[in-house]
Amino acid sequence: MLTALWNARWWPGRTGRRVLFIACLLFASSLAGVAQLQYLQESARLFEQNDLSGAESQARLALTDLSTRAVAYSILGAIRFRQAKYEQSAGFLEKALRLNPHLIGAEINLGNVYVLEGRKSQASLAFNNALKLDHNNFNARFALARLEGESGHYAASLELARPIDSQLRRTDEGLVLLASDELGMKDERAAEGLIEDWLELDNPAHPATLSMAGIYADHELFKDAISILEHGENKGGDSFDIDFALGENYLRLDDLDEAKAEYNLALERRQGCAECLDRLGRIAEQEDHLDEALSDLLKARRDAPADPEVLFEFGKLCVKKGLYLDSISSLSAALKLQPANEKFQYVLASAYTGTRQFKPAIAILRHLVILHPKDPLLNYSLGSVQYLESDLSGAESHLQLSIRLNPQQLGSYYYLGLIKDQQGNSDAAAQIFESLAKRNPDDPATLTALGRILFAQRKLPEAQTVLERAVKLDPSSIKAHYQLGMVLGRLGQREASRREFAAVKSLNAVADKQTEMRIFSLDQ
């Protein structure tokens, strides 16, 4: 009997699929003419040389003989596969199998066509048919195991892979399959054991290296991902993708120096890489090098003006730097690209607050509270901005709810104290601020507010002590210097009082464009 075995392999999903066909013809010359066999041999030879037109011509000549027709259709199916004409490929392969249901290679190739067309149940049937014909066929078993794994059936995939486990461990694709399955089953110990096999590979393919590292990184095994990537780099696979992936994994480990080095290498390989600049900017911000971060993110925004994450990171940093107009512009552009992004909306509300545009800030925060009514931070944020807008009743309601949801939301107590003071209940305000100062003794804003109330209650020595500590904690606080100057003047310490007012004048000259209000924290 004349049979064609067509063995197929493909890369896993991240990098797309790539199919390689290898022809192996076994001849039974008693059932086929010499000419027809020569046509098939020549077709296979031309196929291997990627002369698809010549291979097709020879295969079509073999269609004239019934004994070689099935194999000829199988070859035509392979040719159409390589041409990415999957519908035609499936048609030829199905014809081949109707003529000869024992063509194992045609079943495997047909399964691969079905996979690429998204017809998973039909692909599974084809691979199972191949295994019925040859229970030990490596390619059929591997293909079916991969299909099960990609469908999330990790136990079934491992069961299918068990008879060929030793072979899989010697290939990059096989190890990618096993790692995905083991980690899908939450078996980190088994997955760790695969790292040793991976490091013994002489030349893992570049896409497989990235896939393998990505699997471990997705399960937060960042050190393993780094080992995989470094092995690929040492085997001559260094590239932008590997450098960038190393940077990502070092960043997740909070190893900022190594992450920065890898991102800079990636940037050298790909000039104008906005993602690299974005990550370098984030690292600089994390290291509190805000000017450096602003420079990197400005370049990233220049190179990727339509990247919402880049626009967001730049806008967020501008809020931190007090560049509110730039922040509003960048965040608004990001929201046009992703209108439903709540993170973008929240930071834009902060930017509006920074420019005293309370109404749009309140509108954004009210929308977020409707979506998340039991979020203590959102209720606190809305209440704090409502206070700044002088909506004391609405502010008090949301701040009280924030405290009920999270008694540790200290900012809510601060604004409640300010509300009580504005309502004329200085005793209740003093009680709130005294309690808050005990819980948060190093917050200058709380001490400043408490000192002002103590001054109004004519408790001057107590006010002096509290305000001197506030000034020590925050020498740039205009309010603290001013209140302390008032207290010292009432106590008759005129020279000390004049020094405090001189500090107020000096600070106003430097920061006359800065707002003195307390904006809710983005990091709470």
Image (cartoon, rainbow, N blue to C red):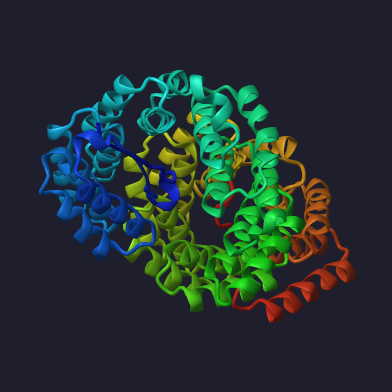
Could you tell me residue 376's position as x and y percent? 48, 37
Kindly tell me whether residue 8 is visible in this rendering. Answer: yes
Q: Quadrant of residue 115?
A: top left
Query: Who is closer to the viewer here, 138 or 18?
Result: 138
Q: Quadrant of residue 47?
A: bottom left
Task: Point out the image quarter for the N terminus.
Answer: top left
Query: Who is closer to the viewer here, 456 or 214?
Result: 214
Could you tell me residue 433's position as x and y percent? 66, 41
Could you tell me residue 190's position as x and y percent? 62, 23
**At 64% from the left edge and 43% from the top edge, which residue is drawn?**
225
> In the rendered view, would you say 50 is above or below 201?
below
Kindly tell me whether residue 77 is visible in this rendering. Answer: no
Query: Who is closer to the viewer here, 129 or 276?
Result: 129
> In the rendered view, would you say 483 is above or below 383?
below
Task: Point out the image quarter for the C terminus.
Answer: top right
| Side of 88 relative to 467 (left or right) | left
- Taking the view exactly as shown, the residue that stands out farthest to the bottom is 509
> In the rendered view, would you say 348 is above or below 184?
below
**At 79% from the left edge and 60% from the top edge, which residue is drawn?**
490
Could you tell me residue 261's position as x and y percent? 73, 63
| Side of 227 relative to 32 (left or right) | right
- In this rendering, the count of numbered labels is 0
**At 75% from the left edge and 66% from the top edge, which residue is drawn?**
476
| Side of 437 relative to 492 (left or right) | left
**At 51% from the left edge and 40% from the top edge, which residue is drawn?**
173
| Side of 51 relative to 249 (left or right) | left
